[in-house]
Amino acid sequence: ELKVEQNPLFLSMQEGKNYTIYCNYSTTSDRLYWYRQDPGKSLESLFVLLSNGAVKQEGRLMASLDTKARLSTLHITAAVHDLSATYFCAVVFGLVNDMRFGAGTRLTVKP
Amino acid sequence: DAGVTQSPTHLIKTRGQQVTLRCSPKSGHDTVSWYQQALGQGPQFIFQYYEEEERQRGNFPDRFSGHQFPNYSSELNVNALLLGDSALYLCASSQWGQNYEQYFGPGTRLTVT
């Protein structure tokens, strides 16, 4: 069965702290995506990771992909309030364009 | 450059009715995918259209159907609405064969009463 699991599902952080969100998936894939969603809004693409060992960084967010471990991480450095949102990882399995999303991590950054 | 657009923004329907949602892809994109996002959950893939054909379908009943037009825009139709169909419906566009990077529209919030 194709599964994408994120943890934690809820994360409350203090400003200035670091933390990591984990995304595990059940079957081989070399295409993993991270999205951000603000309440009542659509999905904003953050990162596209297409190969083993891929690492991408944008501002205080850094994403990595380990296809052998079937694991991606989204690392948050020195969190600020503006990062408060729900973060989703999504995986495309096989040759067909069937994108499966994790349940999301709801991040709250407190002053 | 217009991004992905969807209409309507909000919709309220009654059980048993039918609904049509519309999506126009980002300029240069030829592939449209539809997702259903229930409150507090991740999006679930409904189906994908390319070259006016359904190319892939998720685990949704036949009540959910779609169409793609020659200008690449797309419609999602849902028949015999159930309360459980209440959700945010997201349309995403991409360019076929291009690493599947999708751009999402603002969504249509459907409420079934």
Image (spheres, rainbow, N blue to C red):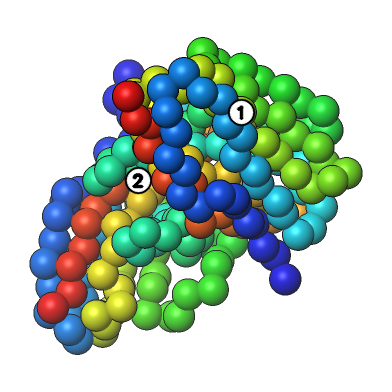
Residue A60 visible? The answer is yes
Circle 1 residue: A75
Mark 1 — on which chain does it sit?
A: A
Circle 2 residue: B73
Marks 1/2 same chain = no
Query: Which of these two is toward me, A48 or B80?
Result: A48
The image position of residue B84, as x and y in percent, is 30, 78
Q: Which mark is residue B57?
A: none
Residue type indicated by callout 1? His
**Mark pair 1, 2: CA separation:** 36 Å
Mark 2 packing: few (<14 Cα in 10 Å), some, or many (20+)? many
Q: With B67 as the anchor, is B95 left or right in this view?
A: right
What residue is shown at x 32% (from left), y 57% (from top)?
B89
Q: Please tell me in which quadrant of the rendered image residue B38 appears.
A: bottom left
Residue B29 visible? The answer is no
Query: Which of these two is toward me, A101 or B16?
Result: A101
